Image (cartoon, grey):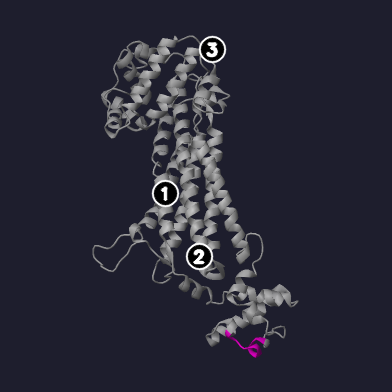
Amino acid sequence: MKMWSGRFREPLDEEFEQWQRSIIFDWRLLEEEIAASKAHATALAAAHILTPSELAQLLGALGSIAASHRSDEGKSAVRNHATAEDIHHFVELSLVERLGSLGLKLHTGRSRNEQIATDLRLYVRRQIHLTVPALAKWADALVQQARNAGEAAMPSYTHLQRAEPVLIAHWLLAYVEMILRDADRLQDCAKRLNLCPLGSGAIAGATLALDRNIAARELHFDAPTANSMDATSDRDFVLEFLQALTFVGLHLSRFAEEITLFATAEFNFVQLPEAFSTGSSAMPQKKNPDLTELIRAKVGRINAAAQAVTLQLKGLPLAYNKDMQETQEPAFQVDFVPQMIALVARFTAALRFNTAQMRAAAQSGYLNAMAAATYLVHKGVPFRTAHEKIGNAVRYALEKGVELNALSLDELRQFGEEFGDDFFPAVALEATIDCHDVLGGTARHRVSHALDKATERIATLTQEAAHAGA
């Protein structure tokens, strides 16, 4: 029996009936639907719509339905159910099988519009609670690699051209900053979505005097939603979640691209771990960066999901519309993200850096030119003039085929009398790194402090994630 069939006399077109069913994808919401149904039953009992005995029977049956469908076989049975339109209908049919007409009583005072709005909030919240700890583990792996690198140096790049030397640790910590922002966005999304739509009815609010705080409390929401029309039509939280995940994907992709480049023979900065690489069926010598290449591509799927929801919501009138059914699949299609981040964390921990090669690269290509200009600034030369003097010195060194610090003092003085014997230690690698002695700079003691702060922030994030997911 349809949940809405009383007004209709003609059967649905058979092909349309199958085409419009959402059980083929919203079966994933079974746990959320069970939890929301238990909360609604508790609110009904508090309003004396259900007796204590009826409440106990319903709660027991709901628990039984959840337990019997947690296996792969059980999930398949939900997904392939012959008659259920959606996950809400499936649970109702299952209750009726167990409890008879009492199973129909649970739908008193609620609508599927508020059910799906609640289930989706619970699902997105759960996905955030899976994603944030995974991000914390990746950040921790980066910090451990940064500590292992110590004071080892590498070139930094702008326009993919060597720019200035930095500590390897400084480069790795750049990704930690991205991760912490990602986690903050997701946590912020979780706070904003953590309101309970139950009691909103189809559009105007429940027709029974339900205490909405009961359901909100049972489901660990902060409070009930404030407006029934908004509650049943709001999918902002789905879009915000997908947009936040797009940032995660972008940052994963940037890291993956750099590792892919740095693992080439042309760079030879990184040794790919064999446990996360594959070979070639044709070329015996190959070790291919499959993990990083796949990660680089995944952001396309994540952003496509966000764009799909954007276009699905565009121009929708209030309140619920069947179009909103299409916002579910994009949310489900990104459920691979926590596993992907976990893989990247293990991959990161297994990376090995060729620090000698990276140090050699950091000492060639005139990467100390900025430090050389700064040396002249300390001698009282205006920066623009210092820039020109060092630029001339670089051109001269290029013609000779040597680095700046390989020029003699006499050669340097043709570009300015300010050059002295103290120039050479001022443009040595460690001095070039340490001249960036500002908060957030790559000077060695600044990076050491940044590592300690990053460790504290990751520990806090881990604790917050554990508390939120409890």
Describe the element under mark 2 as helix, strand or loop: helix
Q: Which residues are magenta?
A: 406-412
Q: What residue did someone put label 3 on?
A: 209
Whichever of callouts 2 and 1 sits on the residue coming sooner in the sequence is: 2
> Would residue 296 appear left or right of 170 to someone viewing this image?
left
Vertical position of residue 323 compared to residue 395: above or below: above
Disc 1 target residue? 342
**Amino acid type, callout 3:** Ala
Q: Quadrant of the N terminus?
A: top left
Q: For residue 149, which numbered disc appears in the image?
A: 2
Depth check: give the residue in front, 231 or 224.
224
- Which residue is depicted at the point 45% across and 31% down? 120
Q: Position of residue 72 (x, y in %)?
A: 29, 34
Give the residue displayed 41% in from the left and 62% down from the top: 260
Residues at circles 1 and 3 in contact by the CB criterion of under 8 Å: no
- Label 1: how many Cα within 10 Å (few below 14, some 14–19, many 20+): some
Residue 213 lies, in percent from the top left, at 55, 21
Cα distance, mark 2 to mark 1? 22 Å
- For the point 37% across and 54% down, the residue is 294
